[in-house]
């Protein structure tokens, strides 16, 4: 079973940048969807960005133009570049892979944006 581990979270001031990484313990080459979600305190988990076959990307309206999702050249890592961060971007960020119809989640990494 492939495991996902997020890293790169932390505390940053509004307007700053962070780069999150999602490392897989095995190959995720066959993943049909790779995505980043976030969950703010007291809120439901929401989709932030996703990658689909054919290099298609989807972003939440709230992060469009500020966040960029990508995969590493080794194909077992996914990144989320977050620029122009806002306090409302605060939350726990999770990565997810969909493989053979199953959702695989990481444990999450905390991002806190101070005003």
Image (cartoon, rainbow, N blue to C red):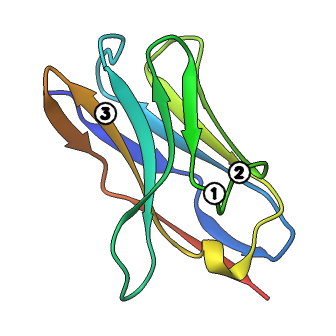
Q: Position of residue 38 (x, y in %)?
A: 45, 63
State the mark number for residue 97: 3
Question: Does residue 75 appear to the left or right of 29 in the view shown?
Answer: right
* Separation of marks 2 and 1 at Cα, in angstroms: 5 Å
Q: Position of residue 67 (x, y in %)?
A: 70, 48
Residues packed near mark 1 inside 10 Å, few (<14), some (14 to 19) or many (20 plus): few
Question: Does residue 62 appear to the left or right of 54 in the view shown?
Answer: right
What is the tally of numbered marks visible in this picture? 3
Which label sits in the foreground, 1 or 3? 1
- Judged from the image, the secondary structure of the residue bearing numbered disc 2 is loop
Of 80 and 107, the residue lying toward us? 80
Determine whether 55 is above or below 115 in the image: above
Whether residues under marks 1 and 3 lie with C-beta atoms below 8 angstroms apart, the answer is no
Determine whether 91 is above or below 105 in the image: below
Residues packed near mark 3 inside 10 Å, few (<14), some (14 to 19) or many (20 plus): many
Q: Which residue is mark 2?
A: 64
Whether residues under marks 2 and 1 lie with C-beta atoms below 8 angstroms apart, the answer is yes
Determine whether 66 is above or below 55 in the image: below
Of the image marks 3 and 2, the number of the one nearer the N terminus: 2
State the mark number for residue 61: 1
Q: Quadrant of residue 52?
A: top left
Q: Give me the residue at 30% from left, 56% from top.
A: 107
Q: Give me the residue at 63% from left, 71% from top.
A: 89
Q: Position of residue 75 (x, y in %)?
A: 48, 14
The quadrant of the rendering that contains the N terminus is top left
* Separation of marks 1 and 3 at Cα, in angstroms: 21 Å
- Judged from the image, the secondary structure of the residue bearing numbered disc 3 is strand
- Judged from the image, the secondary structure of the residue bearing numbered disc 1 is loop
Q: Give me the residue at 51% from left, 31% from top.
A: 78
């Amino acid at each position: 079973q492939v495991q996902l581990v997020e890293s790169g979270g932390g505390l940053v001031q509004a307007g700053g940048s962070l780069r999150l990484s999602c490392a897989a313990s095995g190959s995720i080459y066959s993943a049909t969807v790779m995505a980043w979600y976030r969950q703010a305190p007291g809120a439901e988990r929401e989709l932030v960005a996703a990658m689909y076959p054919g290099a298609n990307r989807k972003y939440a309206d709230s992060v469009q133009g500020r966040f960029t999702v990508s995969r590493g050249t080794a194909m077992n890592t996914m990144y989320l570049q977050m620029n122009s961060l806002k306090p409302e971007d605060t939350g726990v960020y999770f990565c997810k892979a969909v493989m053979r119809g199953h959702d695989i989640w990481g444990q999450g990494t905390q991002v806190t944006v101070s005003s």
